[in-house]
Every structure is written in C-alpha cells, then in structure tokens.
Image (cartoon, rainbow, N blue to C red):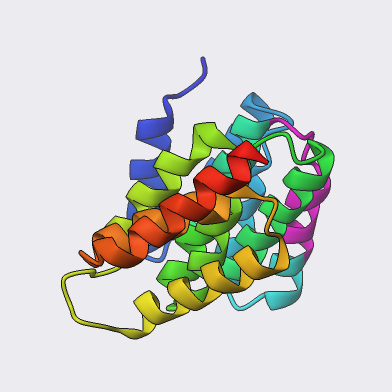
Amino acid sequence: KKPSTFYYNYLLKWLIEIKDYKEAGKLIKKHMKNEPGNPVFLVDLGSLNKLSGDQEEAIKNYEKALKEMTGNAGESINLGNAFKNKEEFDYALKVYEKADKLLNGTYAFNVNVAEIHAIRGEFNKMIDQYLLLAERGDNYIGQSQNLLSININFEEETNDKQEYLRTELLKKNQKDPGNIVHNEMLIWYYKQKNDYATAFIQVKALDKRKNE
C-alpha cells in the first residue's frame, strides 16, 4: 500500500527531529521504491546524508535528482520546492534552469526563480525575473505588476527597489523601443508613484508606437 505524502512528511520530520537517521533513511527508501522516478525523495535522502555528516553522498543524491528530471513542469516545481525547503537554493535554481531548457522556454518559471532570489535577499535579481515575466506577453503583464506591487513599497518616496525597477525599465525601453511592454510597465510604474504627468508622457509615446 502506498503511504500518503502527508504521513510521510510528518513521520520523516519527526524522525529527523529525534535524530533517528537510520529509520529516516529506511522511510525515504521505502517511498523511493513505491514511487520510482520521483526525484524529490533523492533530495530528502541527500539532506539526510548532509545531517549525517556525509556531504559527498549528499551531493551525489542532489546531482542524481537533477539528472532524473524529465522536463515535466509540475515535477520540476515540486523538485525546486523540495530543494528550496531544504534551503538548497543553488540547486533549486539549477532545477529551474534545466527545466527551462528541457521545455524550450515554454513554461514561465520566473515566479519560482524570483521567490528563491527574494528569500536570499537578492531583490534586484527578483525584479529582473518579474520583468522577464512581463516580457513573455500580454497574459503575464498583470501578474508581473501584481507581484512587483507586493514586493516593492511604492508608498515610500523612494527606495532601492523602486529605483532599480525604474532604471531597468528605462534601460529596456531605450534598448528596445519597439517593445511596447516596457512602455506599459513604465506607465504602470509612474501611476504607482502618483506621477500622472510622467505617466501621460509614456501613454503618448505608447500611442505613437502603436500607430507607427
């Protein structure tokens, strides 16, 4: 009988807390047998290796988890989350990098990658990912704006995140003037700042580009 994921996670956490690594290892391997091809269990095993002081074996299992990726988006997110939950952020980023290649960029992992950067305090890289998300097309612009508004305090007169976002949008707009996404994002940015005069300048520029 296949045990539930909830039961597995609860029991594994408890065994690790009481430092019964031998039983924890048995539990993980039992689930690996029940669900062959699920690389998440290799992350659990690698993390257990690390706790047991076997760094070399941990790396082997982490690398094996990456090798077993099939390019399924859901599987990739589960694996990325598994690494993230173990605070193995470099490996989590490797998961999304590989998944993006396997899926030829057809799935937007930008939100997942941005979350990792936010946890690490790499806010410029987080913003970069949200801008890349917007560049995927109209369907993603609203999502990008919502995430930026959650992660950036626009009520302050200015702050580092605001300034980085504004500077990057202006750079992108100058570099690729034919891409109206950057115009739309600039209009949105200035509206967040209640700077409607500058927003209107961008609106006129956008109308001009659309009519060209």
- Image quadrant holding the C terminus, namely top right
Residue situated furthest top in the rendering: 1
Residue 80 can be seen, yes or no? no
Q: What residue do we see at 53% from left, 67% from top?
A: 169
Question: Residue 191: image x %, image y %?
Answer: 27, 58
Q: Is residue 120 magenta?
A: no
- Please tell me whether residue 177 is drawn above or below residue 105 in the rendered image: below
Question: Residue 75: image x %, image y %?
Answer: 63, 34
Q: Main secondary structure of the magenta part?
A: helix
- Please tell me whether residue 151 is drawn above or below residue 10 in the rendered image: below
Q: Is residue 20 left or right of residue 195?
A: right
Count of marks, rendered view: 0
- Please tell me whether residue 115 is drawn above or below residue 29 in the rendered image: below
Quarter where residue 160 is shown = bottom left
- Please tell me whether residue 61 is drawn above or below residue 163 in the rendered image: above
Question: Residue 158: image x %, image y %?
Answer: 26, 83
Q: What residue do we see at 83% from left, 48% from top?
A: 67
Q: Is residue 69 magenta?
A: yes
Quarter where residue 9 is shown = top left
Q: What residue do we see at 36% from left, 75% from top?
A: 162
Foreground of the two, 181 or 115: 181
Magenta range:
60-72
Foreground of the two, 201 or 141: 201
Foreground of the two, 110 or 141: 141
Q: What residue do we see at 61% from left, 59% from top?
A: 92
Quarter where residue 166 is shown = bottom left
Residue 167 can be seen, yes or no? yes
